[in-house]
Amino acid sequence: MDREINQIISNIDFENIQKHPNILIAASFWDEKRYHAAKVCYKFMRMIDDLIDDRKALGDEISCLEQAELSEQVNSWIDCLETMPESDPFYKELIQTIATFKIPLQLFHNFAKSMLYDIDHDGFSSLEDFMEYSEGASVAPASIFVHLCCLSEENGEYQTPDYDIVDVARPCAIFSYLVHIIRDFQEDQLNNLNYFANDILTRNNLLPSDLKEIAHGAAIPESFRIVISEYCKQARIYQDQSLHQLQNLSTKLSDRYLLSLHMIYNLYDMVFDRIDSENGNFTSKELNPTPREIREKVVELASNFPTDYTGL
């Protein structure tokens, strides 16, 4: 394995990466400036996501007044991206990062739209609602990742690609998100979060309350296994599209950025392989690879990636 690649892997703290671990692992193979840009952007998104998830984890019903207060806070954070608040060093860095790397502000607005939906809703009435929500919750942050991958640099200035980044990012983003909600089913339920659409639950004679009982250790009914199978079927559709997009990018990106895209796809594919709709228990322990298993997968991918790493 190339010495620099080996050094990158040795510097990844697999044991302690929290929140967006796959994104941060994959971005570790970029040059330092782009990697830092990713960390800044995802820190901001995590601030918003945690604000809402931490409140929902308390379990109490969110009043109309509190909904308004939370929404106002999210909107104010997004509005600050249009200004340069002198008193906040983090916002200064975030705004400068967005400008330097020419990241479309619309991606942050799309993300915020889904977070605002979370404040006002508990779950999704239909799969279509979930897919629309995914455009902000998953496709938007994935598009920032792909945007940073696909930039070119000329005379010290970044140039955006001549193709639609969101269209490129969408298949892997949704594949990853579908895998993500199955992987985190137990943890989400224990934190009063539900990402399984009501129409699919109803069609299989399930209520959201049934999912919480399963997460707490109740026997898994066949109907829930059918739900998981339906989500896996959807994931396979986007999995195929993801592989197609990766093939399209194979001649457009330099090694380190193409590797990072393959890395994030394969880390979610690794989880997808663990989902056993017929016999699984869908616990966090069962579906989450250990830090050691993740490291082994990263080493395997980096060692076998079919390119010459010279010049990374």
Image (tube, helix red, strand yellow):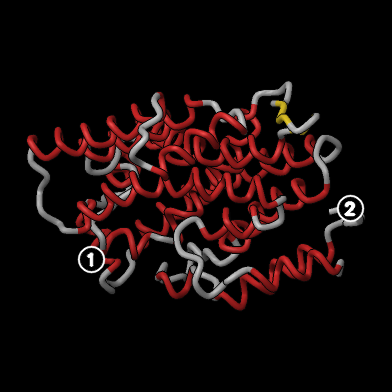
Residue type of the residue flagged with mark 1: Glu
Q: Position of residue 91 (x, y in %)?
A: 41, 39
Dot 1 falls on a residue whose secondary structure is helix
Residue type of the residue flagged with mark 2: Gly
Which of the two discs, 2 and 1, labels the residue nearer the N terminus? 1
Q: Is residue 184 above or below residue 79?
A: below
* Between 135 and 24, the one nearer to me in the picture: 24
Q: Is residue 108 visible?
A: yes
User: Residue at 65% of width from left, 52% of height from top?
Assistant: 265
* Between 142 and 210, the one nearer to me in the picture: 142
Q: Identify residue for label 1.
A: 213
- Looking at the rendered structure, which numbered label has been put on residue 181? none
Dot 2: few (<14), some (14–19), or many (≥20) neighbours within 10 Å? few
Q: Identify residue for label 2.
A: 311
User: Residue at 77% of width from left, 46% of height from top?
Assistant: 258
Q: Is residue 131 left or right of residue 191?
A: right
Q: Are marks 2 and 1 in contact (CB under 8 Å)?
A: no
